[in-house]
Amino acid sequence: MSIVQPEEGRENDRARGPAQGRAGEAARAHRDASLNHWEEAASGWIARQAAIRELSAPVSHWMIDAVDPQPGQRVLELAAGLGETGFLAAEMVAPVGGVITSDQADAMLDGARKRVGELNLTNVEFQVLNAEWIDLPVASVDIVLCRWGYMLMADPAAALAETRRVLRPEGHVALAVWDALEHNPWALLPATELLQRGLIEPPEPGTPGPFALGERQRVRALLEQAGFTEVWVEPLQLTQRAASFEQFWEMTLDIARVFHEAVLSRPPSEIAEIRDSLAERFAPYTAPDGTLEIPMRTLVGVGTA
Ligand SMILES: C[S@@+](CC[C@H](N)C(=O)[O-])C[C@H]1O[C@@H](n2cnc3c(N)ncnc32)[C@H](O)[C@@H]1O
């Protein structure tokens, strides 16, 4: 992985002045915390791999349709996690073309390696890398895919500039980031419960997080500022289905690491209270057959290098 050397980073911070120096420190602290977070979150994600794949399939299909992979092309998936979107492309670019499935967290890529075996894909390689410093040559890939990654990065603008650098002229990027929290009750209701109990802090405005880029114009502007043309961003509605509230609760504990840590650090009586209170909050999303249908809204976008 090619990264700025710590000394070089500090020199740059000194040259820019104290405010940027603090911003640099905050960014470095975020990167360390994010890496730990995702190394720890991986086991829950791998346990729920099939459910995540099913839930998010419409997003992957939108992204793949937008970039239209062709046989022989080289595809890079950033912040790939379990790698599902890139694997759809791998089938389309085979046998000569291939996919680089990358993520900062090697433990997340374990789930992707397992899935490649199940799919018998032979044109996928893996790379541990931070998307803010992509360790690949200029103009070396035809397509970049990044589903639910850029908003988590310390510097999404840097990551998008890097994305464009590694794309060949007229190559395409397709991305997804969560839309604003108010459109995502699957996350809004648990966050409200934990905030009201003082178990989590509200996110600082402007800091990375799942909903940090939840504004269509902002995503569009970031893509254009990175030099992409023919930019298009739109919302895409999804539904998280669960047979019961219990099933939704267990899934959320497995894949939402902040929720997992905040809830499971409490005594059993309080965990039961949180569970009951959340069951009430989600009751309005009960379908006629008794299952839960919880709305989710993501933004999906595409641009040309
Ligand atoms: C919400 S998961 C999404 C995984 C996968 N793309 C998906 O849609 O299922 C976010 C992933 O982004 C990765 N990630 C976050 N910041 C990153 C960065 N700066 N560089 C590379 N990967 C990053 C995490 O390690 C994690 O695997």
Image (cartoon, helix red, strand yellow):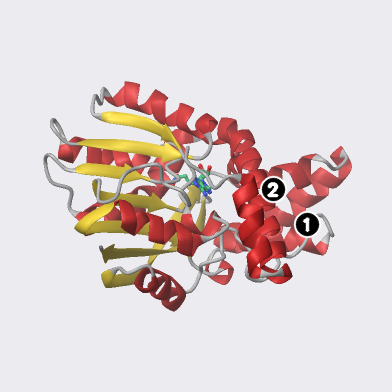
Does 180 appear above or below 209?
below
Which element is circle 2 on? helix
Q: Vertically, is 59 above or below 232?
A: above
> In the rendering, which numbered label is found on residue 200?
1
Residue ID at (56%, 65%): 212
Q: Do the CB atoms of the residues marked 1 and 2 lie less than 8 Å apart?
A: yes
Label at residue 211: none
Look at the numbered disc 2 and say if its residue's Cβ is closer than 8 Å to ligand 1: no
The image shows residue 150 at horizontal and vertical percentages of: 47, 57
Residue 224 or residue 38, whichever sits in front:
224
Earlier in the chain: of badge 1 and badge 2, it is 1
Measuring 71% from the left and 67% from the top, which residue is drawn there? 204
* Closer to us: 72 or 53: 72
Q: Is residue 245 visible?
A: yes
| Vertical order, 13 against 120 (above or below) | below
Please identify the residue farthest to the bottom as the structure is shown.
217
Residue under label 2 = 258
Binning the other alpha carbons within 10 Å of mark 1 as few (below 14), some (14 to 19) or many (20 upward) gives some
Q: What is the C-alpha distance between the residues marked 1 and 2?
A: 8 Å
Determine crowd level at label 2: few under 14, some 14-19, many 20+ residues with C-alpha closer than 10 A.
some
In which quarter of the view is residue 269 placed?
top right
Location of the C terminus (image quadrant): bottom left
For label 1, being within 8 Å of ligand 1 is answered no
Mark 2 residue type: Val
Please state which of residues 85 and 266 is positioned toward the viewer in this rendering. Answer: 85
Query: Where does residue 35 sit, x and y in percent of width and height?
Result: 61, 41
**Disc 1 residue type?**
Ile
x, y percent for residue 165: 33, 56
Residue 27 shows in the view: no
